[in-house]
C-alpha cells in the first residue's frame, strides 16, 4: 500500500446559483486544466430570504500535491468563472488562513 502525506490546505468557494449549472461549469474548468473539485448543493439563508447555491471544494491532494498559492489561484479563477456562469454578483472563497470576497455589484464598487 502506498501512503502519501502533504501539508493540509483547503479552499472552498461559496456561491448562489443552480447546482446543475455549477456542475457543468466546474466540469468544463476541471477538464480544461486537469483538476478535481467537490460540488455540493447548499442553501443560503439570510435576513429576509433564502436561495439555493453550491459549495465547491479544492484540497491539497497527496497524489498530486500542490502549493497553497496554486490551489488558491485555481479557486479564484474558478470563482470568477462561476460568477459569469451562474450570473451572480458576488462569491466568497474561504481558504486555510484567509477569506476573500469578490463582488461586482455596482454599490460595492463605489468608494
Image (cartoon, rainbow, N blue to C red):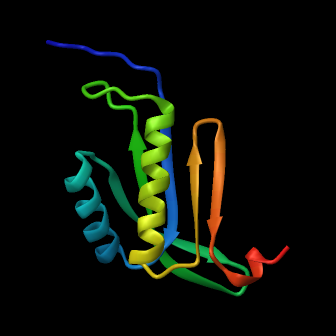
Does residue 12 lie above or below 39 as drawn?
above
Left or right: 100 in relation to 28: right
Image quadrant where residue 95 sits:
top right
Q: Is residue 99 above or below residue 41?
A: above
Which residue lies most toward the bottom here?
48
Of 60 and 73, nearer the camera is 73
Q: Quadrant of the C terminus?
A: bottom right
Q: Is residue 9 above or below residue 83?
A: above
Residue at 24% x, 63% y: name it: 28
Q: Position of residue 87 (x, y in %)?
A: 46, 82
Pick out the residue farthest to the right.
111
Residue at 48% over, 45% down: 73
Which quadrant of the rendered structure holds the N terminus? top left
Residue at coordinates 25% horizontally, 26% vertically from top-left?
A: 63
Q: Residue at point 50% right, 43% down?
A: 72
In the rendered structure, the answer to whether residue 90 lies left or right of residue 84 reads right
Residue 58 image-quadrant placement: top left
Near-viewer residue (37 or 34): 34
Q: Nearer the viewer, residue 20 or 42?
A: 20
Total label count?
Answer: 0
Q: Is residue 98 left or right of residue 63?
A: right
Residue 111, relative to residue 93: is it above or below? below
Q: How far across and how far down the image is residue 44, in percent? A: 57, 73
Give the x, y percent position of residue 100: 64, 53
Measured from the top left, where is residue 85 in percent x and y?
38, 76
- View extreme (left): residue: 1
Amino acid at each position: 500500500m502506498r501512503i502519501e502525506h502533504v501539508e493540509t490546505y483547503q479552499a472552498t468557494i461559496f456561491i448562489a446559483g443552480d447546482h446543475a449549472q455549477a456542475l457543468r461549469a466546474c466540469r468544463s474548468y476541471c477538464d480544461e486544466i486537469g483538476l478535481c473539485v467537490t460540488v455540493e448543493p447548499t442553501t443560503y439563508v439570510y435576513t429576509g430570504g433564502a436561495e439555493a447555491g453550491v459549495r465547491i471544494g479544492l484540497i491539497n491532494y497527496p497524489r498530486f500535491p500542490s502549493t497553497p498559492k496554486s490551489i488558491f489561484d485555481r479557486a479564484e479563477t474558478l470563482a470568477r468563472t462561476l460568477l459569469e456562469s451562474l450570473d451572480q454578483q458576488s462569491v466568497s472563497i474561504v481558504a486555510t488562513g484567509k477569506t476573500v470576497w469578490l463582488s461586482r455589484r455596482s454599490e460595492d464598487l463605489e468608494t
